[in-house]
Every structure is written in structure tokens, then in C-alpha cells.
Amino acid sequence: MNHIEKIKDKWLRGELCVGSAVALTDAAVSELFGEAGYDFVWIDCEHSAMSHADALNHVRAARGAGAAAFIRVPSNDPVVMKPYLELHPAGIIVPRITSVKDAELAVASFQYPPQGNRGFGPARGVKFGAISPPNYLADINQQIMLILQIEHIDAVKQIDDILDVPGVDSIVTGPGDLSGSMGLSGQSGHPDVVAAVETVYKAAVRKGIPAGHSTGYDPQGIKRCLALGLSWIAVDGDWITLFRHSARVAEEIRQICVTENQ
């Protein structure tokens, strides 16, 4: 019901999955991205005004348009994470992972006992009663991915140990916060930050864990992602895409008016 099988099938074939970030509250954005051909949408509940109800509508819209939904939760907190898990997205992105302890907390919050401590109360996950609890529990860990976001240099230094924590399904970096932890705020393109990011991805690929990257659209940058062996990329985002296209169109029209009036 959440199209996770489409993501995993592409990975098995060695194909790159492509998505985009969603921060605007209107669920039509996720529907549009799905219809445009994106494999997934990154629903950002950390840095947006999106409510839990808005996130649910985005999950529904993505599902209807054939795209998987990844939700970045506001924090690595079991109480905060639980209601987003109940939306039954294809993936949960946990931000601001800084240590092995953080990774273990995320896994424990993500999984039901005895492996974790997630409270039991699914609705969408059991298709509102169509699936029995035992059948639901039998493969729930295959139905939703836990994606850890590495956003601190301390985590980069511990990346092998973090990736060895059982239950980590995928990894992604956060160059913005990572650069800040390195004393290079706002310099995600700095060689030291780029090297730290690549350290994370090389470790993940070496251990056979799918790695993803959030980036602006840049053909050469995409080629570098492919060279690193990444499994997925989230390119740009709704407000970035809307602003850039709108600004370009407005400027081009003004240039046409100037030319026609000469």
C-alpha cells in the first residue's frame, strides 16, 4: 500500500530512485511529483509548517500517484516518531543522528517489542482491520524503512559502528547541519564537508546499506552521486522548484517585452 516494493525492486536491479522534497502543506504537491514520475517524495516534517494531518494527506496523495512516501520526522524521539509510523509511509527519516546511541534509540523507537519499544496501535498498517495483527507483525519491518540522517561530524567518525546497528535500512547525510558541526556553517560545498559526506556513503556502500543524498539539481553532481554508488537521491524541493521556474519565466517575459519595444 505504500509502494516500498517499487523502491526495493529498483535497488535490486541497481537502478537509482529519484524523488523530491515536500514542505508545502497542500497534498497536491505530492500527487504532482508522483504524476511527474518521481519514485518517492520526501515529506519534511522537521523544517516546515506541516502538521501530522498534512503529512497524512501527502502520504495518501503519493500513494494514489504511485510514489513512495518518506517522512522526515521532527526529532529522534519515540513519542514524536510513533504517530508518523502509524501513517505507514515507505520510509521514516530520522534527523540529527550524532552517535551510535542515537542510532540505537531510533531503531528501538521504530521496532515493536522484543526488538524495540514501539507502542502497538496500527490502523492504516493493518488496512483498518483487513490484516490480522499477527500477519501485520510478521513482516512490518519489511514494509517500512528506517533511514538515518547523519548530520554531525561526530557521527561521521563513528559511521562504521552506526551502520552496524541492527535495523538500519538506509542512510542519508545532512550537509547543512554537518557543515555547522565542522565550523563551516553554510558551506556544504567545502572540500572538508564533501569529504565527510563521501566517507559516510562509501562506508554504507561497503556494508551493502542503501545510501541516499539530498541535493540541488546539478547534472555533474548527479554523476558524482552515481559514481559513489548511491541508491537514491532527493532533488530540489517543491518551493525551490516553484521559485526557480517562476523567477525564470518572469525574467524571460520581461526580456521579451524589452525586445519587442525596441
Image (cartoon, grey):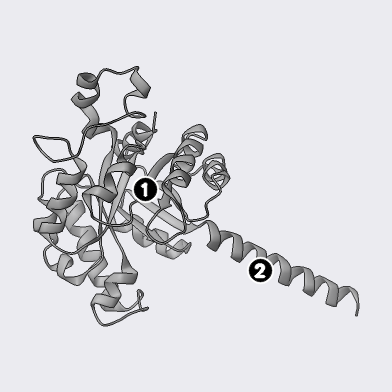
Give the residue displayed 24% in from the left and 55% down from the top.
76
Calculate the distance from the C-alpha at mark 1 to the C-alpha at mark 2.
29 Å
Q: Secondary structure at mark 2?
A: helix
> Up-down: is 57 above or below 20?
above
Q: Residue at x 60, y 65 (%)?
A: 243
**The one of 248 and 86 positioned closer to us in this rendering:** 86
Q: Nearer the viewer, residue 102 or 228?
A: 102
Residue displayed at 66% across by 68% down: 247
Mark sitting on residue 71: 1
Residue occupied by mark 2: 247
Q: Secondary structure at mark 1?
A: strand
- Mark in front: 1 vs 2: 1
Q: Is residue 19 left or right of residue 77?
A: right
Q: Quadrant of residue 161?
A: bottom left
* Residue 108 on image: x %, y %: 14, 45
Are dots 1 and 2 in contact, CB under 8 Å?
Answer: no
Q: Residues within 10 Å of mark 1 (few under 14, many from 20)?
A: many
Closer to the chain start, of discs 1 and 2, is 1
Residue 186: quarter of image: bottom left
Query: Horizontal and vertical percent for residue 29?
Result: 55, 48
**The residue under label 1 is which amino acid type?**
Ile
- Amino acid at the residue labelled 2: Ala
* Residue 59, image x, y percentages: 44, 39
